[in-house]
Amino acid sequence: MLFERVIDSVVDTESCYRAVESRDARFAGRFYVGVMTTGIYCRPGCPARTPRRINVSFYPSAAAAEGAGFRACLRCRPDAAPGTPAWAGTEATISRAVRLLEETGDASGLADRLGVGDRHLRRLFARHMGASPAAVLRTRRLHLARQLIESSALAMIDVAHAAGFASLRRFNESVKTGFGRTPTELRAKVPAGSSLVLRLPLRPPFDFPRLLAFLAPRCIAGIESIQDGAYLRTVREGIVEVRAAGAGHLALRLPLALSAQAFEIVARVQRLFDLRADPLPIFRHLATDPLLAKLVTPGLRVPGAWEPFEMAVRAILGQQISVQRARDLAREIAFEHGEVLPHGLLFPTAQRLAQVDLKGMPDARARSIRALAQAVDQSGLKLDAATTIEQLRTVPGIGPWTAEVIALRALGSPDAFPSGDLGLCKTMQLDPRALEAHAERWRPWRSYAAAAIWSAP
């Protein structure tokens, strides 16, 4: 028979099919499903139509399914390695694409960055978003432009440029089409003040206090702080402030001098506070595990990073030392090699750290930081949503734990998990190997499980 069954037990195959019927992604990687009528093999949780029981066979590995003559499904990507972005399927591709659009403000070259074909990416956007990547980006720009019009006294040409429009004419046309009013009509009155306040939408519930409590002991003095229920960040132009503004928004206050960078600043805040997440499906999935149920909350978010390179350096510094010691080392680096301003500190750039010898830490760690800085500054390593853990592991001194932490906090991966983390192991009372095995049931949101464990009371 062409499609040989390699999982023979009737009990086992029936259990496997029940997992397929329920689309239980927790079984992904444990077995694979060959569909005889199509010649395609999938993993449990595939969004494609569920095949009839009589038409499927089960295999213990992707290699076994391919050896039996099946080809990999293009929707669930069962041939991808666990933990890679492709493993999470097309929804992960869309999620990464949207993050790249928001963080770069550029739709050109998006498919190449994601490692997919341009035509395939357009199909994914049409299916999941109902619009092209360029149209999604224009919508993001348009809504930012409206906030800038209504909450600042910026000249319209400056609003257009801050929101990413190449010309004032295109800006005027887009605003008129999108809102049925001209930019001047949208601005009822000219707001006064030396700062700009933007409202950033999010999907409630949102546990902002829990995020701040996690960030507080990790704040680098002079660079960031938590004060009166708000997050403060030093930038060259002044201080950026983020605080809660009702159930469905955060309020972002920034100096007017930063208005031209509003698109970038908004993306940084979205990454730092995980504002793109849809929390309820994540909560429902993780809460099914008795070991995790008491730790997760409906408003759980993953604490991200203001600047990915800075977070990557801090992950290297945090290897096998306490949170407090890693924070103090980061401040020493900032004070010694960053920039001292009247109102605070700026963390050093990759270009700067690629050229200096770091003191006060093990030589291997210092070499790893320098290698990372050189990779970012000279070798084109981009620390963003398109970067994979495999790429991070090519940097000398970045091992599994460090790469997973960088992916989790700096790159916004929803499924990164540093199973060797001492804090995670201690709280869960499992050794790294047992924790890694147990965490398989938390996919595709292992990052949220880690955040819940780290921030547990």
Image (tube, helix red, strand yellow):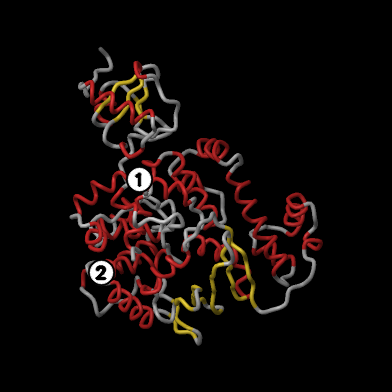
Amino acid carrying label 2: it is Arg
Question: Is residue 36 found left or right of 173 in the rendered image?
Answer: left
> Which residue appears at 74% of the width and 55% of the height?
175
The answer to which of 75 and 172 lies nearer the viewer is 75
Q: Quadrant of residue 249?
A: bottom right
Q: Quadrant of the C terminus?
A: bottom left
Residue 307: tell me if it is visible: no
The alpha-carbon separation of the residues under discs 2 and 1 comes to 43 Å
> Residue tagged by mark 2?
367
Q: Quadrant of residue 172?
A: bottom right
> Residue tagged by mark 1?
288
> Which residue appears at 42% of the width and 46% of the height?
284
Q: Is residue 173 above or below residue 187?
A: above
Q: Is residue 42 above or below residue 111?
A: above
On the image, the x and y values in percent for residue 13 come to: 26, 24
> Which residue appears at 47% of the width and 52% of the height?
279
- Of labels 2 and 1, earlier in sequence is 1
Residue 223: tell me if it is visible: yes
Amino acid carrying label 1: it is Thr
Crowding at label 2, few (<14), some or many (≥20) Cα neighbours within 10 Å?
some
The answer to which of 344 and 391 lies nearer the viewer is 344
Question: Is residue 327 found left or right of 178 in the rendered image?
Answer: left
Q: Is residue 40 above or below residue 240?
A: above
On the image, the x and y values in percent for residue 52 come to: 39, 19
Q: Secondary structure at mark 2?
A: helix
